[in-house]
Image (spheres, rainbow, N blue to C red):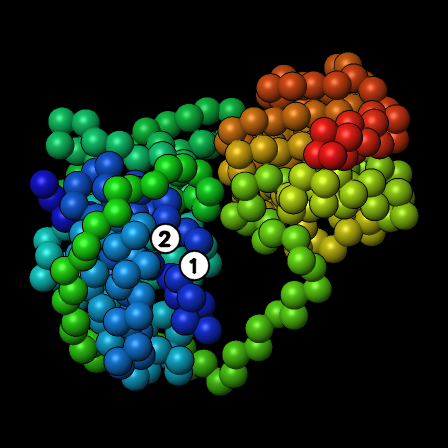
């Protein structure tokens, strides 16, 4: 079986990011999953067991003392070195800001083809095929890369499952970075988290509200349902533009693209630009008082009704079930 590299993102505090699970699951479906991690010297060993539990059969630890000072340079060198050593058929990264940044540079370096924002990958006749949801989710296309390894960025949350746990072999390599060609990190400021809710991008459940909520005060209803479900809160652009919620919660073409297990749309009409960011959700529930709202065209379950009548009943019913 061919090696498939999965680039593992690590937070500033040294935690493996959630995207690792789906990348290693996808890699295992295509070949031998190899986790590639860029770490500060001597710190990567603690990640090996966790990566093995997520299915990595090999862990390639690329150590660099410039990880915290040069933007994505060490990560790029890590993948370049792993690709040279392991001759992979595919290289998977998260479709995050970091993943896309590295993937583009890596494709130029390796002269390889790049497919971005894939929602699935599979093997056919020995070739890697990546599925993308395009034109606002109206079409699904499959793409293959001719020649060189296929570099694919995978949409967060799009690929489910869990690769069988493995006891990985470990390769440690020291990588050198060229500071002259890299952006320098002056300071890192973590955005203060003011919410205990899941992060929107990779939340398994999302409740989003639209203009139909009517005001910032009434938008609280969206948050109440989200909390009852343990979900993240999202919004349409109209809700953001109306000042109901900050722009960071906007789902859609000019906002965040999500692919949760459950997406509940409250008072959202379902404009193409909104659908572009959520259409690949596994189950879509829509509550809207207009039976002709386009959101019902893609909803798995729909309720034609007023959110201020339906949602409180839903929360009440869930609470009754929980007791
Ligand atoms: C270049 C471009 C980029 C864009 N990017 C995005 C994007 O990233 N994300 C995005 O969302 N939009 C985006 N838009 C805007 C998009 O076209 C729509 O205008 C927007 O999605 C509409 O938001 P909405 O559904 O909340 O509002 P509306 O379209 O006004 O729909 C409100 C809905 O609420 C329902 N409603 C009203 N009251 C109630 C009630 N009490 N109970 C139940 N239902 C009720 C109505 O029936 C209606 O269907 C973009 C537009 C452009 C041109």
Report the number of numbered marks: 2
Residue 221 position within the rendered picture, expressed as x and y whole percent measured from the top left? 82, 40
Identified at 30% across, 84% down, the residue is: 65
Task: Mark yes or no: residue 306 visible.
Answer: yes
Badge 1: how crowded within 10 Å, few (<14), some, or many (20+)?
few
> Do callouts 2 and 1 mark residues in contact (Cβ within 8 Å)?
yes
Identified at 67% across, 58% down, the residue is: 196
Q: Secondary structure at mark 1?
A: loop
Task: Mark yes or no: residue 109 visible.
Answer: no
In this figure, which residue is indicated by the disc labeled 1? Answer: 17
In this figure, which residue is indicated by the disc labeled 2? Answer: 20
Residue 204 picture quarter: top right
Identified at 88% across, 42% down, the residue is: 218
In front: 166, or 307?
166
Residue 227 picture quarter: top right
**Residue 63, relative to residue 18: is it above or below?**
below
Identified at 26% across, 71% down, the residue is: 45
Residue 108 position within the rendered picture, expressed as x and y whole percent measured from the top left? 25, 58
Badge 2: how crowded within 10 Å, few (<14), some, or many (20+)?
many
Identify the mark at residue 226; answer none if there is no mark.
none
Q: Is residue 4 left or right of residue 298?
A: left
Pick out the residue farthest to the front.
323
Q: Secondary structure at mark 2?
A: helix
Pick out the residue farthest to the top.
291
Q: Is residue 8 left or right of residue 170?
A: right
**Quadrant assignment for the C terminus:** top right
**Quadrant assignment for the N terminus:** top left
């Amino acid at each position: 079986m061919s090696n498939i590299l999965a680039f593992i993102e690590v937070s500033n505090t040294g935690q493996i990011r959630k995207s690792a699970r789906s990348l290693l699951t996808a890699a295992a479906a295509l070949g031998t999953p190899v986790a590639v991690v860029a770490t500060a010297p001597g710190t990567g060993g603690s990640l090996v067991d966790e990566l093995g539990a997520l299915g990595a059969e090999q862990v390639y630890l690329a150590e660099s003392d410039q990880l915290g000072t040069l933007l994505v340079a060490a990560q790029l060198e890590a993948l370049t070195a792993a690709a040279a050593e392991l001759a992979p058929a595919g290289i998977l990264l998260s479709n995050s800001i970091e993943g896309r940044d590295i993937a583009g540079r890596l494709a130029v370096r390796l002269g390889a083809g790049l497919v971005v924002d894939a929602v699935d990958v599979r093997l056919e006749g020995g070739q890697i095929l990546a599925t993308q949801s395009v034109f606002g989710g109206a079409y699904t296309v499959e793409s293959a890369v001719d020649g060189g390894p296929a570099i694919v960025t995978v949409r967060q949350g799009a690929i489910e499952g869990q690769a069988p746990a493995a006891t990985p072999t470990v390769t440690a390599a020291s990588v050198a970075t060229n500071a002259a060609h890299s952006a320098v990190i002056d300071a890192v400021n973590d955005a203060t988290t003011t919410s205990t809710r899941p992060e929107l991008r990779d939340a398994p459940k999302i409740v989003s509200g639209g203009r139909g909520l009517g005001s910032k005060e009434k938008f609280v209803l969206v948050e109440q349902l989200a909390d009852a479900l343990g979900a993240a809160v999202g919004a349409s652009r109209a809700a953001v533009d109306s000042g109901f919620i900050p722009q960071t919660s906007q789902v859609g073409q000019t906002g965040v693209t999500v692919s949760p297990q459950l997406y509940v749309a409250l008072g959202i009409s379902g404009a193409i630009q909104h659908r572009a960011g959520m259409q690949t959700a596994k189950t879509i529930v829509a509550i809207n008082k207009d039976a002709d709202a386009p959101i019902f065209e893609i909803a798995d379950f729909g309720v034609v009704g007023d959110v201020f009548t339906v949602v409180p009943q839903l929360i009440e019913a869930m609470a009754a079930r929980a007791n």
